[in-house]
Image (cartoon, rainbow, N blue to C red):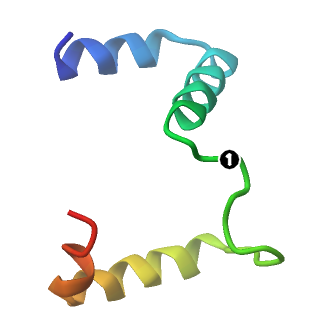
Amino acid sequence: MNKEERIKRFKSMSSSQRKELILKKMKNIGIDVGSGVPGRKYDNTEVYELIHIANCFPELRNKNK
């Protein structure tokens, strides 16, 4: 299945079906819901700022590749 077909299939799903699919994929790769830093809440602006900062440092972007 190519990328366009996957996108079309994903958009045709209901919200609950999407959540179910995402949770299933997370479980398959070993990610638990809420598995971040304990006791830490992130707002969207903070996350976007961290992404922007990481993009300024190539050594941070390529660390896990």
59 to 16, vertically: above or below: below
Horizontal and vertical percent position of residue 38: 79, 73
Q: Nearer the viewer, residue 28 or 20?
A: 28
Q: Amino acid at mark 1?
A: Asp
Within 10 Å of the Cα at label 1, are there few (<14), some (14-19), or many (20+) other Cα atoms? Answer: few
Q: Which corner quadrant holds the C terminus? A: bottom left
Query: To which quarter of the image does residue 35 belong?
Result: bottom right
32 to 12, vertically: above or below: below
Residue at 19 percent of width and 73 percent of height: 62
Instruction: Find disc 1 in the rendering and name its residue.
Output: 32
35 to 11, vertically: above or below: below
Residue at 68 percent of width and 74 percent of height: 42
Query: To which quarter of the image does residue 1 belong?
Result: top left
Q: Nearer the viewer, residue 11 or 54?
A: 54
Q: Secondary structure at mark 1?
A: loop
Report the side of 48 relative to 64 (left or right): right
Q: Nearer the viewer, residue 2 or 32?
A: 32
Horizontal and vertical percent position of residue 59: 19, 86
Q: Nearer the viewer, residue 6 or 30?
A: 30
Residue at 59 percent of width and 47 percent of height: 31
